[in-house]
Amino acid sequence: MKLWQYRQRQNPDRTSSRKTGTASFFRILCILLAAGSQLVAQQDRAIIDEVVATVGGEIILLSEVQEQYAYIKQQQRELPEEYQCVVLQNLIVQKLLVNQAKIDSVEVKDEEVETQLNARVDRLLLYFNQDEKAIEDFYGQNISQIKDQLRNDMRNQLLAERMQGQITNKATITPSEVKAFFYAVPTDSLPYFNAEVEIRELVYKPQVNAKEHEKAKARAEELRKRITENGEDFAELAKKYSADLGSGQSGGDLGFQKRGTFVPEFEAAVYKLEQDQVSQVIETEFGFHIIQMLERRGNLVHARHILIKPEITDADLDAAKAKLDSVRQSIMNGEMTFSMAVKRFGDKNTASYNNDGRVANPRTGNTFFEIADLETDVFFAIDGLNVGDITEPFPYRMQDGSTVYRLVLLQSRSKPHKADLKQDYGKIQTAALEQKKSEFTETWVLEKLRSTYLSVGPLFNACPNLQQLLAHNRP
């Protein structure tokens, strides 16, 4: 029995084998690469494994296909089972990209992998309201185990993205090509855009008062004494007291890191330590740290730390709100622009800081938000504003659990409308460029398949898209 039996008569649009059938996959490829290696809920892990494809000397397991399919289905509930054919094709292409990246000595640094892993963990913690026990119950793994599971796949994801970038970096699009792309779509098939807004933000961190600053320092000194004089276990104290949620669960373990990974004060301290030595309490922009060197291999260090953050009091929050009130008034009075205010008062660690305060939509990557994409507090804050207006300061919870204050400027607002070349030129230009990049990638993949061994097992050999790849793989 074939696992996939496409019935074209039931859904001819879904399985059309028109000339662009393969290209449609490559347009999906960027989305799937962005998804990368995924976590699957504990109850979804009962998979009997087998090899479903071989690419060169690399195998692809059924579990890999089903785990990525399960993740995508979490995002898109109405996902047909045969979509696993697309997922397998994505994995085949990713194997080709990673293999070529290794041949071409494309480099992904360890710290890049760790940064992406930490970002993934931060998003998980935010989703689960900082409840690490809830994460462990859901996935059957603690934070450290999750990072270990994802690390190799994350590296391969970054290698594939970098290789694909090299393949498509010469793709450009001219205004005439954008126009041709737009007018090639039948009028009755043009997409309908919902109402959208663009926003800019100024994120202001409350300033720690002197009393709380000293209390946090004293707390860190006390913990260091418990380790160095009383012989208490560093890892257990990290699990219990560290404010670094990402590493705290794993006893403060930061893994192996290269020089240049840490903020200067932390790095200066860690590279002075001998194996098993515990540092003095050091202060960085994040708070107070106690560091222990576990192992050093040249410029690679394996350390763990305990982070103690000064508490932000209600008075500190009130002062932050008052400060932003004053900044807002200065902007409205014409004493400074919003851009000037962002550079002068904004938190340098926010993504929008280096983009003139412009906020990117994490779902699309551009700066346009449909109303449903907005955070609830932002939606209510800008409701009723005119373009160019600025909200009152309002509190915002960061991924690390800290509270900051935020000003939001309504940059633009559009009404629901059918795609229009003039009004939506930026979106249409992006779509046209992405299509050209897809064509570049498709050409590269099909050419690469001519010299790369590819086999697809019986579970998937009825997939039309995979048959197209196999056809290019034959002499």
Image (cartoon, rainbow, N blue to C red):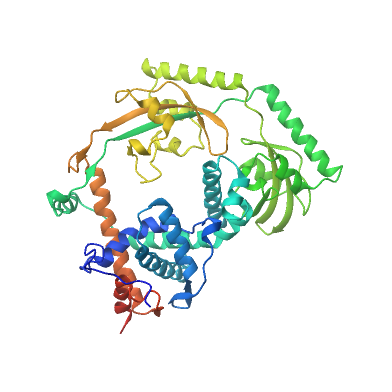
Residue located farthest toward the right when viewing the structure as drawn: 230
Q: Which of 119 and 207 is in front in this view?
A: 119
Do we see residue 109 in this rendering? no
Residue located farthest toward the bottom when viewing the structure as drawn: 475
Residue plotted at (69% across, 41% down): 242
Task: Residue 255: give x, y in percent of width and height.
Answer: 65, 54
Q: In which quarter of the image is residue 217?
A: top right
Task: Residue 360: give x, y in percent of width and height.
Answer: 39, 40
Residue 207 against residue 461 in the figure, above or below? above
Task: Residue 123: give x, y in percent of width and height.
Answer: 51, 45
Residue 98 against residue 431 in the figure, above or below? below
Residue plotted at (51% across, 67% down): 47
In this image, 351 relative to 193: left or right? right
Quarter of the image that includes the N terminus: bottom left
Quarter of the image that includes the C terminus: bottom left
In this image, 209 relative to 3: left or right? right
Residue 257 against residue 227 in the figure, above or below? below
Q: Quadrant of residue 163?
A: bottom left
Q: How many labels does the image show?
A: 0
Q: Nearer the viewer, residue 466 or 459?
A: 459
Residue plotted at (42% across, 32% down): 376
Do we see residue 8 in this rendering? yes
In this image, 371 relative to 282: left or right? left
